Image (tube, coloured by chain):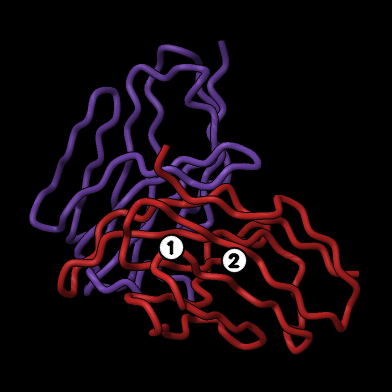
Amino acid sequence: DQQVKQNSPSLSVQEGRISILNCDYTNSMFDYFLWYKKYPAEGPTFLISISSIKDKNEDGRFTVFLNKSAKHLSLHIVPSQPGDSAVYFCAASNGEGNDMRFGAGTRLTVKP
Amino acid sequence: DGGITQSPKYLFRKEGQNVTLSCEQNLNHDAMYWYRQDPGQGLRLIYYSQIVNDFQKGDIAEGYSVSREKKESFPLTVTSAQKNPTAFYLCASSQWIGTATYEQYFGPGTRLTVT
């Protein structure tokens, strides 16, 4: 069963505009959420995370929002740059290493 | 440079052969993981190890085996019992403090093709 879902397989945005990537989860036991970025033929790299005790975490151009009641999180990239073009994975964990679940990924394309 | 190395990048095998994928890390991380990625799907956990000489099955362990004889190394063997072995395999590591883990660091992956 897919406990973490990224319903948009792809997203295209103009350079300088905001990119919003969405993620939904079903397991209410998840208490730590992460976003990873992946370029072709490379492993994912950690981007930003948020604990369930917060509803927002910001790091430069990247902000993650968490809505626990809706079991939804989103990643905002402002302003978007062509170098942000990659596949973004959402992941969720209950703090145990055996329960990190990943979404299927969203391919972001930022057009110059 | 600290990091995770996986070799080889591409691997081709005939059906019925066992094959071992290498994963080495010099980050001094306690925990290591193996994931499999298939098109249109998220990463699925095959095996993980919290400490040397100990490992646990993930969601899709059937047809795979691992060992953890050294902290730095966590090789994965894809056996002939694995029905659909062709996939992209990712190794990861993380700190392990008590029961909490931190973000995982991934290697570049190995693309295995079995014909």
- Mark 1 residue type: Glu
Against B101, residue A77 (above or below) is above
Residue located beneath label 2 in the image: B36
* Label 2 environment density (alpha carbons within 10 Å; few <14, some 14–19, many ≥20): many
- Chain of the residue under label 2: B
* Label 1 environment density (alpha carbons within 10 Å; few <14, some 14–19, many ≥20): some
- Chain of the residue under label 1: B
Q: Residue placed farthest to the left in the image?
A: A53
Chain A colour as displayed: purple
- Mark 2 residue type: Arg
Q: Residue at x 66, y 62 (%)?
A: B38
Q: Which chain is red?
A: B
Question: Which one is nearer the viewer's eye here, A49 or B76?
Answer: B76
Q: Residue at x 49, y 72 (%)?
A: B45
First of labels 2, 1 by sequence position: 2
Q: Are marks 2 and 1 in contact (CB under 8 Å)?
A: no
Question: Which one is nearer the viewer's eye here, A51 or B36?
Answer: B36
Against B20, residue B105 (above or below) is above
Residue located beneath label 1 in the image: B72
- The x and y percentages for residue B1 are 42, 37
- The x and y percentages for residue B77 are 66, 77
Q: Residue at x 18, y 59 (%)?
A: A68
Q: Is residue A50 left or right of residue B34?
A: left
- The x and y percentages for residue B110 are 67, 56
The kind of secondary structure element at disc 2 is: strand
Against B62, residue B15 (above or below) is above
Observer-side mark, 2 or 1, equals: 1
Q: Is residue A92 left or right of residue B108?
A: left
Q: Residue at x 47, y 81 (%)?
A: B58
Looking at the rendered structure, the number of numbered marks drawn on it comes to 2
Against B57, residue A36 (above or below) is above
